[in-house]
Each structure stands twice: as structure tokens, then as C-alpha cells.
Amino acid sequence: MLKEGMLIVLSGPSGSGKDTVLAELFKLDLGIVQSVSMTTRKRRENEVDGIDYLFVDESVFLSAIESEKMLEYAKYGNNYYGTPKAPVDNWLADGKIVVLKIEVQGAGNIRKMYPDAVSIFLTPPSLEVLEKRLRGRGSEDDEDVKRRLDIACNELSRICEYDYVVVNDDLMSAVDDIKTIISAEQLKVSRRNNLLSEVNK
Ligand code: 5GP
């Protein structure tokens, strides 16, 4: 187990397949935990409150910010999204690998707070594929799809801020790439203080 845990930030445009990739990654039982974000967005039909998100109204969200319960938050489209602080702090202290599935502004804030965080950008193979996926899932109306595509262009222009980029063309190779990133990060000298003190005894 890692002494101080590892924080992984996974970003990527809406429709890049973050949820599907994460679902496959969890099947591998690598001991990863995922933070449940709070949002003011409306729940989609297939989503469960408390599992996919904590769905709250704006006053609850703003009061969580006010009382410093959020690690980071951002406005995406017309809604707020944010990461509750306490579970992440506890998991990291416990040596867990914690995944935050967040957009680019939040990722930037996390990088400032946690310089050791590993940031991964999941990208679709092309904007055409992205649009097809967004329209295909049918959970957003036309205006929302257009808004998400606009945001995607801005997000794609910020890939260079990330440590790694993974192309989600083939699902299982994307999962494999993320698994490789995690394994390599676990072997970094800077994360192996315990081992080094043993070896140097
Ligand atoms: P969606 O509405 O598609 O579920 O999410 C929209 C965007 O918000 C996605 O890019 C998602 O990763 C991001 N997001 C979800 N939770 C959080 C969060 O806690 N903080 C931030 N900054 N972004 C989030």
C-alpha cells in the first residue's frame, strides 16, 4: 500500500467515455476509490443519488462552499459541480488510490493543491466521434449537446496541462493505458519512501 495514497484526476470532454473506462478499471480490483461529486445538475434517468452524484439544489451547494466542505468546485454549463473534501482526505490518509472525475478548471485547482496528483486527460479520437456519442446517448437536448461540444473544444485545448493523455478509441486499450500509468506512478521513487528507508538501513 502507498504511504500517503495517490490522487488521480481524470478529465475529458463530456462523451469521452470517462464513466465507461472507470467502470472497467474498477473491475480490475486495483483498490481504487472514486469520489462522489456534488452537483446542482438534474439527475439523469439512469443515475442514482449518492452513487453517481450527490444531487443538491444551489443553496445547499453554495452553503457547502461557504463552510469550506468542498475541495474544489467549478461551474460547468449552467450547473455547479464539486468534490466534497472529507472523504478524499480520509482515503488519502489511508493510502488509497483516489480518482476524481472532474473538468479542466477543477483539475487545475487540484494540481495547485496537490502537486503530486497524477492528471490524465481522456480524449475521444475526434470531435466527430464525440458529437456522435453525445447525440447517441440521448440524455441531453440539442442546445445542451452544442454547449457540451463548445466546452469540449476549450477542454481539448488544455490537454498540455495534463501529465498523460489517453485516447479512447478502443475501450479496453484505454483501460489498459490507465492501468499502466497507475503502475508506473506506483513505482516512482518519490512515492516509495517506506521502501527506501528499509533498503538504506
Ligand atoms: P456531467 O454533467 O456530464 O455528469 O459532468 C459534466 C462535467 O463535470 C464532466 O466533465 C465531469 O467530469 C465534471 N465534473 C463532475 N464532477 C465534478 C466535480 O466534482 N468537480 C469538477 N470540477 N468537475 C466535475
Image (cartoon, rainbow, N blue to C red):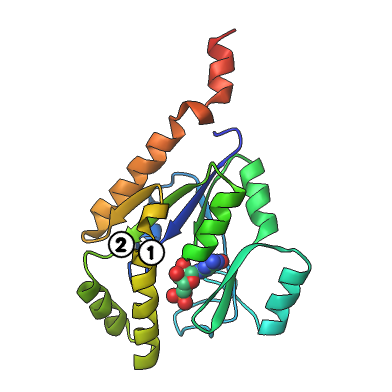
Label placed on residue 147: none
Task: Please provide percent x and percent y for residue 199.
Answer: 53, 11
Q: Where does label 1 land, which residue?
A: 12
Amino acid beneath label 2: Thr
Amino acid beneath label 1: Gly
Q: Would residue 188 be found to the left or right of residue 115 on screen? A: left
How many marks overall?
2
Tell me the distance, in whole angstroms, between the alpha carbons under discs 2 and 1. 6 Å
> Do labels 2 and 1 touch, CB within 8 Å?
yes
Residue at (36, 72) in percent of width and height? 152
For the N terminus, the quadrant is: top right
Q: Would residue 26 be found to the left or right of residue 60 on screen? A: left
Secondary structure beneath dot 1 equals loop
Task: Please provide percent x and percent y for residue 111.
Answer: 54, 51
Task: Please provide percent x and percent y for residue 37.
Answer: 58, 67
Pick the front one: 129 or 198: 129
Task: Please provide percent x and percent y for residue 142.
Answer: 34, 92
Q: Where does label 2 land, which residue?
A: 123
